[in-house]
Amino acid sequence: MRLEWNPTFSRQAEQFDLRYSCADCGNFDVGRQACAHKWPTVDHRLPHAGAEEADREVVFCKEFELR
């Protein structure tokens, strides 16, 4: 699922300690730096990093499992 990043989402993610990136997923193989299910990780690895605010998206993986 993709949604447009906005300041409200950012505040709520911090307030509720929302986890949604590969680093927090039980399916992420830290040693290989890859998804154990072979899904692409580029959209999930560093949410918002390097993007202009107007172009930011939050991408949720449907196979995300909290560690």
Image (tube, rainbow, N blue to C red):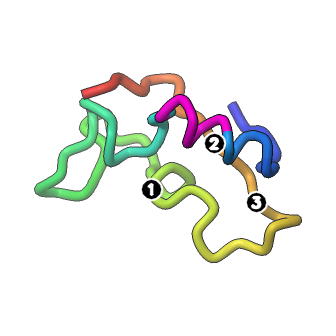
Going from N to C along the chain, the mark reached first, 2 or 1, is 1
Q: Nearer the viewer, residue 47 or 40?
A: 47
Q: Is residue 16 left or right of residue 54?
A: left
| Res 26 → quadrant | top left
Q: Are marks 3 and 2 in contact (CB under 8 Å)?
A: no
Residue 37 is left or right of residue 3, and the answer is: left
Which residue is labeled 2 in the image? 59
Note whether 23 is above or below 56 in the view shown.
above
The residue singled out by tag 1 in the image is: 45
- Dot 2 alpha-carbon crowd within 10 angstroms: few under 14, some 14 to 19, many 20 or more: some
Say which element carries label 1. Answer: helix
3D distance between C-alphas at marks 3 and 1: 14 Å
- Furthest-front residue in view? 15
Residue 14: x, y in percent? Answer: 55, 42
In the depicted structure, whether residue 18 falls above or below residue 4: above
Residue 2 position within the rendered picture, expressed as x and y whole percent measured from the top left: 73, 38
In the rendered image, residue 16, in percent from the top left (x then y), is placed at 53, 29
Residue at the far left in the pictured view = 31
Instruction: Give how far apart the Cα atoms at labels 2 and 1 are.
Output: 10 Å
Q: Looking at the picture, which amino acid does disc 2 mark?
A: Val
Asked if residue 41 is among those painted magenta in the image, a careful observer would answer no
Q: Secondary structure at mark 3?
A: loop
For disc 3, the marked residue is: 56
Of the numbered discs 3 and 1, the one sitting upstream in the chain is: 1
Cα separation between marks 3 and 2: 10 Å
Residues drawn in magenta: 12-17
Q: Residue at x 50, y 49 (%)?
A: 44
- Residue furthest out toward the right: 54
Marks 3 and 1 close (CB-CB < 8 Å)? no
Badge 3 amino acid: Arg
